Image: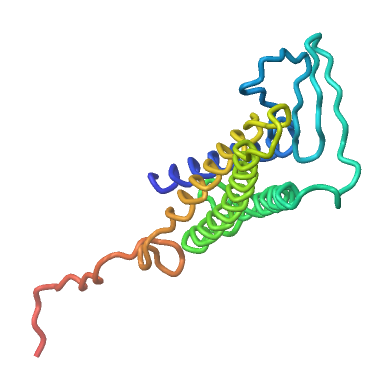
């Protein structure tokens, strides 16, 4: 029962993290304009994401524009986009594999040992998805920090962390933690027999009748 609860907890955490990665990939608030040290009051805030950039005015009007050319984007943005998409796709395979291997589902047959190994494989797939997203968010965040502290960058063109980076980090950690719980839920070798039943001790001898034969 404890092992089944561990599997369910890991799957739910990985699923929530995967949904968070999708939301982070779509949202345009990966970095926002920073006016640190600038005394000029600006009525426009600039947000940039993986797919588009948006300008928000003080009146509440928002204008967004999708990036026209892929080749004009910097290497960090292209790598982040690729890793996030790979993470989402790998997460789909992790969901499918883990669903087949969980004890609370009927998929994957009745062999408990086989189902546990399938769930463990799904956990490792989730780990790969979370690591890809974590690398993407950390790479993008490192680029923001480098540009912010670059003395050659004008103050009005500096950016800070947006909500998309934090959501990506949170989602990747949930996916990694959920995948780790699924990977650790595999039973020890020898805890189940060939048909999934627990192995007992030595076979008991047939009861003696108390009679001796010559």
Instruction: Determine the image quadrant of residue 22.
Output: top right
Q: How is the image coloured?
A: rainbow
Q: Position of residue 161 (x, y in %)?
A: 62, 32
> In the orientation shown, which residue stands out farthest toward the front?
152
Q: Position of residue 24 (x, y in %)?
A: 68, 36
- Residue 159's place in the image compared with 10, above or below, is above
Q: Which residue occupies the foreground of this view, 141 or 122?
A: 141
- Residue 64's place in the image compared with 14, above or below, is above
Q: Position of residue 27 (x, y in %)?
A: 73, 32
* 133 left or right of 85 in image: left
Instruction: Determine the image quadrant of residue 163.
Output: top right
**What residue lies at 60% left-to-right and 58% top-to-bottom?**
108
> In the orientation shown, which residue stands out farthest toward the right?
68
**What residue lies at 9% left-to-right and 77% top-to-bottom?**
211
- Name the quadrant of the N terminus: top left
- Residue 8's place in the image compared with 132, above or below, is above
Q: Position of residue 184 (x, y in %)?
A: 42, 54
């Amino acid at each position: 029962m404890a092992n089944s609860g561990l599997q369910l907890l890991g799957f739910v955490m990985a699923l929530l993290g995967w949904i968070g990665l999708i939301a982070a990939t779509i949202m345009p608030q990966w970095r926002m304009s920073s006016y640190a040290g600038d005394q000029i009051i600006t009525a426009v805030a600039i947000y940039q994401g993986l797919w588009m950039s948006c300008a928000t005015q003080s009146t509440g009007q928002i204008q967004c524009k999708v990036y026209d050319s892929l080749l004009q984007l910097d290497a960090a943005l292209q790598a982040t986009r690729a890793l996030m998409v790979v993470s989402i796709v790998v997460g789909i395979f992790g969901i499918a594999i883990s669903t087949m291997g969980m004890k609370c589902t009927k998929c994957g047959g009745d062999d408990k040992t086989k189902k546990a190994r399938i769930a463990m494989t799904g956990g490792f797939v989730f780990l790969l998805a979370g690591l890809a997203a974590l690398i993407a968010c950390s790479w993008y965040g490192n680029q923001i920090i480098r540009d912010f502290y670059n003395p050659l960058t004008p103050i009005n063109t500096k950016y800070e962390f947006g909500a998309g980076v934090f959501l990506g980090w949170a989602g990747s950690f949930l996916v990694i933690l959920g995948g780790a719980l699924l990977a650790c839920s595999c039973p020890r070798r020898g805890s189940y027999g060939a048909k999934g039943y627990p192995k007992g001790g030595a076979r008991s001898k047939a009861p003696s009748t108390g009679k001796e034969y010559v």
